[in-house]
């Protein structure tokens, strides 16, 4: 296969917009430590279909969470603590993503919007889940996370709300989110490949998105020491809330 056949045919304006979106999403992730899929999906769906947006996000999500979990000092403890959550998440996100081509665009748009709203409200107002320590809770929240992740590529809100409700320490929270995001990303990618959504042109665009995301991530880390974190955080989350509301309205109307 020739290089020309691998390269996606995009107009220059679309390329610039995609690069800008992934750069912004990387800045948000680097500054806040969270929010990459929410930041990207809220803007990508303005210019491309939801299914393509989900496919483009796969590589950036995969590599940023390999890095995040790889840096965790307590990897074995994390894996031993959340096995049932991981299994339920893995299975449900794979099964949901297998049929992504069959879901109406309106459903995907609403699902993405709902997850952005939940994500924003959770972090703005500290909403938590009344969860217990048992295996059933891990399986239930893991399945919910997987279904929502397969529909929208955003499964962080249930994961974060569960860990907060379990009073996870900062190190455990960061390491566990990296682990569970990585666990979910692998079957999501497999489901997208089987569904025919991850093609060579998509991979090329996703690699460009990954480079811009990593660049933005570094910029966000630098900004973290120079800009008021609480102010930036509230501005971004309010923007997510508005974008999520717009997506819900677009899907329903």
Image (cartoon, grey):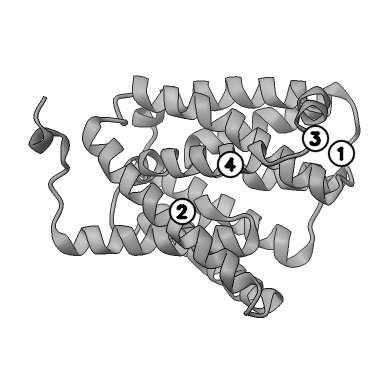
Mark positioned earlier in the residue sequence (3 or 1): 3
Q: Position of residue 186 (x, y in %)?
A: 51, 26
Q: Position of residue 239 (x, y in %)?
A: 53, 71
Q: CA distance from mark 3 to mark 4?
A: 14 Å
Q: CA distance from mark 1 to mark 2?
A: 35 Å
Classify 10 Å Cα crowding around label 4: few (below 14), some (14-19), many (20 and above): few
Q: Are marks 1 and 2 in contact (CB under 8 Å)?
A: no
Q: CA distance from mark 2 to mark 3?
A: 24 Å
- Residue name at image x 88 percent, y 42 percent: 166
Mark positioned earlier in the residue sequence (1 or 2): 1
- Residue tagged by mark 2? 214
Quadrant of the image occupied by residue 70: top right
- Residue name at image x 34 percent, y 30 percent: 101
Q: CA distance from mark 3 to mark 1?
A: 23 Å
Q: CA distance from mark 1 to mark 4?
A: 29 Å
- 45 w.r.t. 158: above or below: below
Q: Nearer the viewer, residue 77 or 238?
A: 77
Quadrant of the image occupied by residue 107: top left
Q: Position of residue 144 (x, y in %)?
A: 66, 33
Report the quarter where the C terminus lies.
bottom left
Observer-side mark, 1 or 4, equals 4
- Residue tagged by mark 4? 67
Mark positioned earlier in the residue sequence (1 or 4): 4
- Residue tagged by mark 1? 131
Classify 10 Å Cα crowding around label 1: few (below 14), some (14-19), many (20 and above): some
- Residue tagged by mark 3? 74
Secondary structure of residue under mark 3: loop
Observer-side mark, 3 or 1, equals 3
């Amino acid at each position: 296969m020739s290089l020309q056949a691998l390269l996606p045919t995009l107009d220059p304006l679309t390329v610039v917009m995609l690069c800008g979106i992934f750069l912004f999403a990387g800045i948000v992730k680097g500054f806040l430590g969270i929010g990459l899929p929410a930041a990207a999906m809220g803007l990508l769906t303005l210019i491309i279909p939801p299914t393509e947006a989900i496919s483009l996000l796969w590589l950036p999500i995969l590599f940023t969470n390999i890095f995040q979990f790889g840096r965790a000092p307590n990897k074995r403890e994390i894996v031993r603590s959340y096995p049932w959550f991981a299994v339920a998440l893995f299975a449900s996100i794979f099964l949901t993503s297998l049929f992504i081509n069959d879901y109406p665009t309106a459903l995907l748009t609403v699902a993405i919007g709902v997850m952005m709203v939940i994500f924003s409200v959770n972090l703005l107002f500290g909403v938590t889940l009344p969860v217990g320590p048992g295996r059933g809770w891990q399986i239930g929240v893991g399945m919910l996370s997987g279904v929502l992740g397969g529909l929208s590529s955003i499964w962080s809100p249930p994961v974060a709300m569960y860990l907060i409700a379990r009073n996870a320490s900062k190190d455990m929270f960061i390491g566990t989110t990296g682990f569970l995001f990585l666990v979910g990303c692998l079957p999501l990618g497999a489901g997208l490949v089987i569904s025919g959504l991850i093609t060579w042109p998509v991979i090329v665009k996703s690699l460009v998105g990954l480079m811009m995301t990593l660049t933005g991530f570094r910029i966000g880390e630098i900004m973290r020491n120079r800009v008021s974190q609480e102010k930036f955080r509230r501005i971004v989350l309010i923007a997510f809330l508005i974008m999520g509301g717009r997506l819900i309205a677009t899907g329903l109307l």
